[in-house]
Amino acid sequence: MPSRLLRRVGVAAAVAGMITVAVTALPPGAGATPASDAGRAVSYANGHGYRTSVAVLDTQTGQFAGAGDYNSAYASESVMKVFIATRLLMTGQMTGWNATTAYKMITQSDDASADALYGRAGGDGVINWVKSALGIPSLGSPPLRPGWWGGTQITASGMAKFYNAIRHRPQVWNWLGNAMHHATQYGSDGTYQYFGIPSATSGAAIKQGWGGDDAAGQPAFNSTGVVNGDRYAVVILTQGGVYGSPIAGMVTAEARLLMPGGKIANDDPDGGVSAWSLHGRYLTVSGWAIDPDDLSSQLRIFFYVNGRPFTYVDTARPRADINAYYQASGEHGFSQQLALSDGTNLVCAYAINVGAGSNTNLGCRNVPLSGVPLGGISSAPQQGLTTTLSGWAFDYDAPDSMVLVRAYVNGHYAGGTLTTTDREDIDAALHGTGTKGFSLTVRTPTGLSTICAYALNQGRGATANLGCIKRRVSQSPIGRMDTVQVQANAVSISGWALDFDTPDSPVGYLIDIDGHHSGWGPTPVSRPDVNTAYGVTGNHGFQRSFALAAGAHRVCSYAINAGPGGNSLLGCQTVTVTAASAPSPAAPAASSAPASSSAPASSSAPASSSPALNAPSSSSPASSAPVSSSPASSAPAAGPLSASTAPTSPGRG
């Protein structure tokens, strides 16, 4: 078992603020190399009383650089956990529980996980197995004390060769590299494990180690991994000083001296893409590049699209910031516009090397383009017979122009408009100018309709479907019995009705009192609120008064359907008349009671819960009463049929 005597309460808090040694990260000067930077790091640590070794290995070229006693043994601490993972991976054991446990072991440097897997990976013999399997005799040796895995002996040069070997073995690196790239900020014991390499650069794959397993009884803090886009294996092994933030801060200082500017110095050009700016199908790429072998010369930047040479440009733009940082002269900035084609465009920029070294990939960006316009429907509120489509459209072939949008209802053309509304979000996202938003109102028939919007293409490509929505307009009339008021011996009834089959015409209505047809006719009253809410014209209101005998009476009103659908119950209400009754009401006057041939009959039967609305007999009103006059079975409580049938403004809510 590894020593945990130094992993005590308070260490986590101390290590969290461990970057206490101040080292300025200077840019590499002309002629800076991994070897010279490693020497600076070792000299600094030695000058403060630490024993240390640094190793750097280029996994592309195989070139090695080191400083300090990089061939001498150091206590591995938790760094050796990569050996456990490597054996499990190379022997096909990295599955199920093993994989879950090993991932925690690597990412959180979890000791309990290492304890559980150590025996499965060969115990103290795991390092000899890895040495043999990868051909690295200088890697190290088993722990001096059996079973004490933190005391496994490793060398800086051997660890650099180890990372180089697994970097070229997908069977190992695909899993282990991913885990190392996801190392957590704190270990499972609460220790801050971003000292060293991760405090000096970004994007590194790391495995750290800390503890007191050194044979001399001194603290040992190690920072290892792969940097510069997984190109360089970097190993920093350090012992001495005081456990916690002092030694951890020293390892961070070494890492910053080794990687000035956040990367390993080399002969390859340095640089990057500062901006990718797309305007229509034109991509402007801007950035900078400089070669350490010739700090004053312009460099050539080559652009590749989908792996093929596309164009090039020289660094002909001044970049005072780059000159100041690298203590250089000359022009090191570039900007180039690329006209891209429809389809997928993987654009990469490369700085062409001068002298020793290799070309540098400055960055890549995937830019998919289509000749087909882009866009969509953002909202589609419905108001009566109309639906308003709002959205946006953009055409790469005309990024600053309006786009023509057309709408179709059930496959039939229903209207068109240009994108005349400002959409700054679209212009910003797609690098265009002008207006990209649209709003188009279309009329929909009764029943279920499919409404689609299309953007007409300009230049290359085809018309784009921006989306389709479904909307349903009621086939049966809608409406409401708004008021039922009793005054003396009379009851006054008002309401409204609308039939979308004849939206601009009056609607037939019928009033039943105690199961008898008492009044009917077309809606004669103007209701501007209904017209406004549903976008229609015509008269859609009704108001009638009837004299009743004293007592309780059930009042119901109905809208008579025209066209497909059925009649609709507008509402029912029970009222009580307390005044003395007038003589029995006579038959409706000729003006309000049409002949039986013109009575409000429906072309389709009402729902089973509503009374049959047949024309009343002029000689026998009782014979035309509903099949069931029971309020419980034929009429709901007063109010709208449902929320969907009531307009937004007329009547009571």
Image (tube, helix red, strand yellow):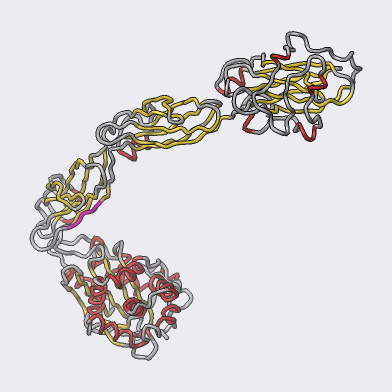
Q: Is residue 636 left or right of residue 564?
A: right
On the image, the x and y values in percent for residue 104 come to 42, 72
Quadrant where the N terminus sits is bottom left
Eyeballing the image, is 62 above or below 458? below
Residue 598 appears in the rendering? yes
* Front one among 159 and 295: 159
What residue sits 35% from the left and 29% below the top? 435
Give the farthest residue toward the left. 355
Percent from the top left, x then y, of residue 302?
Answer: 14, 50
Specify the principal SS of the magenta part: strand
Residues shaded magenta: 360-364
Q: Residue furthest top?
A: 590
The residue located at (63%, 30%) in the rendering is 645
Q: Quadrant of the C terminus?
A: top right
User: Quadrant location of residue 317?
Assistant: top left
Q: Is residue 578 magenta?
A: no
Question: As drawn, is 224 to the left or to the right of 297?
Answer: right
Question: Residue at (47%, 74%) from the top-left corner?
Answer: 10
Q: Position of residue 487 (x, y in %)?
A: 83, 18
**Where residue 219 sits: x, y (%)?**
36, 81
> Is residue 448 rendered to the left or right of residue 25?
right
- Does residue 361 show up magenta in the picture? yes
Q: Quadrant of residue 211?
A: bottom left
Tell which residue pokes out farthest to the right in this image.
580
Number of numbered discs visible in the structure rendering? 0
Which of 321/432 is in front? 432
Q: Is residue 21 visible?
A: no
